[in-house]
Amino acid sequence: MYSASQTVFFLLFFTLLFLLLIFGETTPGIPLLGGLVLLLLLFHRQLKITNTFQTLVPVALMGLLTLLSFLSLITTISFPFTLYSSINLSASFLLFLFVIYRDRVWMPNAMLLLGSVVLSIIFAVMTVFYTFSPQLQTFLPSSTLLTSYFGHNQAVTLFLLILPLVWSLAERERKKVARLGVVIILLALLLSFSRVGILLGAVEVLVLWRTTMDKKLRRVGGLFFGVILSVGVIFLALSFSSRFLDGACTVPQFKDQLCKSIHTELRPAYWSQAVRAWQQRPLTGWGAGTFALLSPRFQEQSGEYSGYAHNEYLQMFTELGVLGGMIFLGFTGWLLLMAVRALHSPQERVQFGIGLGTVMVLFQALFDFNFHMVGLWLVFLLLTGVWITEQKIDLSAKAAPFLARWSKVVRLSFFTLGSIVVLWAGLYVISVGVWRLGDKQRAVQLFPFAFWRVEDLLVDPHPIDEKSRQYYLWLYDAHYRVWVTAASATHTSAADKAKFLEKANKLDPLSQERQLYYLQAVYESKDWSQFEPALEKWRAKLIAGKLQDVEYDQHRKVAAWATEAGDSLFESDKDKAVRFYQLGYEINPNRFYISEVPIMHRLNELSRPQLLNLLETVEFGTVARYDELIYQAEALQLQRALIDGDISATERLVTVLLKQGHDWGIYELVKTQWQSHKTRLSSSAEETKNILLSYQKAIDTWETGSEEKRDFDRQTVDEVKAKIETLSSTLHSTN
């Protein structure tokens, strides 16, 4: 018979663990995790820290990883995310310590293994049920293992880990109910729709089938090996098929699960993001739990965002730097070595089974983020902790003094970390109560690490004081969503909105919609010094084809803002006004074709460079309605350029007029201007030279670019050449 303390602990422990499997990634997961740690603290008297090296390596490595996670708070880009990750890692470490150092007479390994098996079978039944009744997912939060978007991919970790144990239980009990457990786990594994998981499951079944002596299990294993292998091969074949690129799917109900083409697989993009992020901070990393903030920064194409790197080893290096990555590799490598040793002894079915499951899960971690799901990570540490205590290693005699000190370190760590986790969960629970009472500001002050609450507070109709707002924006400086939320508040000024959206765009540079909102905010703030570079960036992205998600009407709206900015600056700063007109035209030329643009009626007020900058930008087909106005302004400036001897401007003006189709207009203008000008050239020889060369440039440009394909008026040409030669001779003799 089991004692009352055993029964209470067993029931509470596995109930909390089961709930964490489901709700670990949601807000209820915070008090659930705190409850689990509190339970461990209440039963701390059952800790029997023995003097043995048997547990030293894994405990030391897990402890160092936890410590490094807290140390990363110094260099992290997100204090809230890193603290949250450190709390989860602390709770996991405490469970690991408790399982390893518990009194095994009070809580035998068999009880913990039985609880894990029962928990996993119940969870497997639920995943099968939810797969065929997806409407039930509406009653759960959106981030649970039962409401996964692509099947229960992450849950496959649990099934790979537990299958060998359920198998060994069926071997030992030799009952139908035990074999039914094997069938349920295998069915749930198939319905996880995890491509890698299904193939690993096939390998696992093959190994178990080859090593079992139970004939009935061999039949079950052989049947399911064939089924799993066939499904896995078909699944992979479908993944490489291009027919799913257009969204077609043979079984629409399971479109997201079955019809996942390998051609659209984004894991390589996530891995690339992790590597490039690590290269920027190889020593310290970016802080535990921050990959979700790094992914938008390092996206190369829109739509490549992920909260996880889909490779646990890469993510550890990215978040905790080279030291954290090496510690994690050391911990998993040690487990792998122990697993390989266990696989050489198939007769030890429990150790063999946990070792086999460990190998599968560690391999799957190359392609997924199973260890970042707190419930799965806890179960993994629970089973590996039990497995470690099954090992027959005892070198205590060689280092008894050291191990005595080690015992004190373990106890101190247990109580310190436990107190931190319970305090964290307690503050959250209190803040929930305060929030529900309506005092949102006090709730966030108590627990400022729930970013969703901070977002709610920032957009609350009753604005918080500026000091508090600046504090929360500082705390969540690396969170683009918080900046976007602050910008969307009705009480945020246009200038602040522009500043907040600019910050968000730096953190998530590929959001096309937000770029539009930023442009609008800067335009409304009338900060033209910011508006011009914002338009330049929009134009550059448009030319590079990086605004494919932006509709035509939105480009037209941006062009309208640009021309309206030009209108407002026309009197005070014509140079900047012209630049805005240019940008507006380049972003959407039809703005000039369809709508009335005031500057086209005021071209005569522009200087020669301003007019040329504007007219060299436009295609004259889109401004045909202003043809006469444009010609008048150009003709006036061409006359002035000839009089002033502005050679470059003369060439540019003639070129623009030719593009506009005014060949004969230029011909007559230059000819007439020469006849009235030739007798009153400048008294300065240098100025006269420039004037003559300007006429020469106008004639040459006309003859080269005119559609008439004929020579200019010979009399004018000869007179200009003669005067140039005479002037040249005079200058030569003078010199």
Image (tube, grey):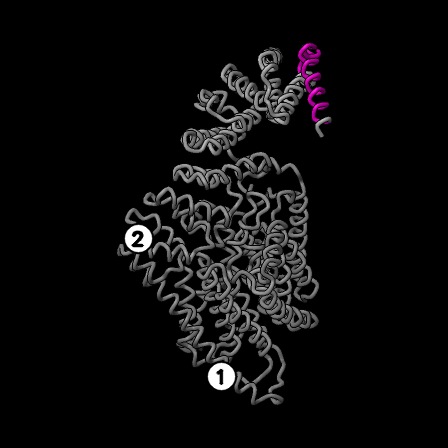
**Cβ–Cβ below 8 Å for labels 1 and 2?**
no
Does the image show residue 414? yes
Does the image show residue 382? no
Q: Position of residue 79 (x, y in %)?
A: 45, 61
Region of the chain picked out in magenta, as a range: 706-732
Location of mark 2 (residue):
464
Q: Nearer the viewer, residue 479 or 213?
A: 479
Q: Nearer the viewer, residue 359 or 458?
A: 458
- Per the model, the C-alpha gap separating discs 1 and 2 is 47 Å
Residue at coordinates 70% horizontally, 13% vertically from top-left? 718
Q: Is residue 721 magenta?
A: yes
Q: Position of residue 78 (x, y in %)?
A: 47, 59
Residue at coordinates 43% horizontally, 56% vertically from top-left? 476
Image quadrant in which the C terminus is located: top right
Type of amino acid at the residue the image marks with label 2: Ile
Give above or below for 53 relative to 326: below
Label of residue 408 in the image: 1
